[in-house]
């Protein structure tokens, strides 16, 4: 889905189209029943997941009041009835276990949110996280090394978009983004 389709605010973050496409691919939602989006922002990841997978129940957690308003408006705009918006700060109580969790922001509680996310996941469930800060990437990778995860993958993506400049064009770069994906190990015993 094009970024321009979403209502946006000045101070509300949004996972951009190319990063969102990679994250959704890594979440592997085709057979999933429940998906949790931590720090949903404008709702771009939640909404694209809900539109592409109408059978999916999406829990979108967001703490920013301005983002909550945009998230609600975007859900109405796209007719997403399979998204439950949860105002609050993760970790918080979520009744239904998840097949996939996306973390677009950690609010400074990264390792606690990784542990909480893994606790929410069913065995074999997918966790995908995006970061722009090198320190968060290092912290996440170090912490995941101590967790019961499999299929750990990390990519850095750098995207540049064509823009007009005078009578010519140039590629304006976006910030590099790190994308970590893994799955909760199956229970043995």
Image (cartoon, helix red, strand yellow):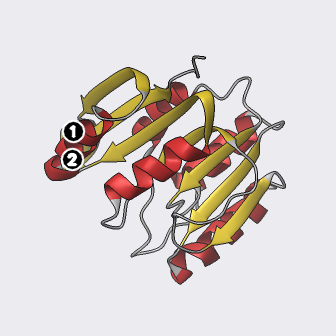
Q: Left or right: 72 with respect to 119? A: right
**Which is more toward the observer, 71 or 141?**
141
User: Residue 103: x and y, percent?
Assistant: 45, 50
Q: Quadrant of the C terminus?
A: top right
- 59 is higher (above) or lower (below) than 48: below
For image coordinates 15% across by 47% down, the residue present is 134
Tag 2: Cα neighbours inside 10 Å, few (<14), some, or many (≥20)?
few
**Which is more toward the observer, 15 or 167?**
15
Provide the residue designation for mark 1: 142
**Which is more toward the observer, 107 or 121?**
121
Evaluate whether residue 38 shows in this view: yes
Query: Can you name the residue that lies furthest to the bottom here?
Result: 65
Q: Quadrant of residue 35?
A: top right
Tag 1: Cα neighbours inside 10 Å, few (<14), some, or many (≥20)?
few
For image coordinates 36% across by 23% down, the residue present is 152
Label 2–label 1 contact, CB within 8 A: yes
User: Residue 180: x and y, percent?
Assistant: 35, 34
For image coordinates 65% across by 64% down, the residue present is 93
- 105 is higher (above) or lower (below) than 49: below
- 93 is higher (above) or lower (below) than 170: below
Q: Could you say whether the residue bearing mark 1 is in a helix, strand or loop?
A: helix
For image coordinates 55% across by 45% down, the residue present is 119
Provide the residue designation for mark 2: 139
User: Residue 163: x and y, percent?
Assistant: 26, 45
């Amino acid at each position: 889905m094009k970024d321009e389709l979403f209502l946006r605010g000045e101070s509300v973050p949004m996972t951009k189209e190319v990063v969102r496409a990679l994250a959704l691919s890594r979440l592997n939602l085709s057979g999933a029943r429940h998906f949790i989006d931590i720090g949903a922002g404008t709702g771009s990841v939640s909404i694209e997941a809900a539109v592409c997978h109408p059978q999916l129940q999406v829990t979108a957690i967001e703490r920013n009041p301005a983002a909550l308003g945009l998230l609600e408006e975007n859900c109405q705009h796209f007719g997403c009835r399979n998204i439950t918006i949860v105002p609050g700060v993760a970790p918080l109580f979520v009744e239904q276990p998840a097949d996939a969790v996306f973390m677009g922001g950690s609010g400074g509680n990264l390792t606690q949110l990784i542990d909480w996310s893994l606790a929410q996941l069913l065995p074999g469930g997918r966790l995908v996280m995006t970061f722009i800060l090198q320190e968060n990437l290092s912290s996440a990778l170090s912490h995941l090394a101590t967790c019961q995860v499999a299929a750990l993958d990390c990519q850095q993506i750098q995207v540049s978009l064509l823009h007009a400049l005078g009578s010519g064009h140039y590629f304006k770069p976006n910030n590099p983004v790190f994308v970590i994906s893994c799955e909760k190990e199956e229970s043995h015993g």
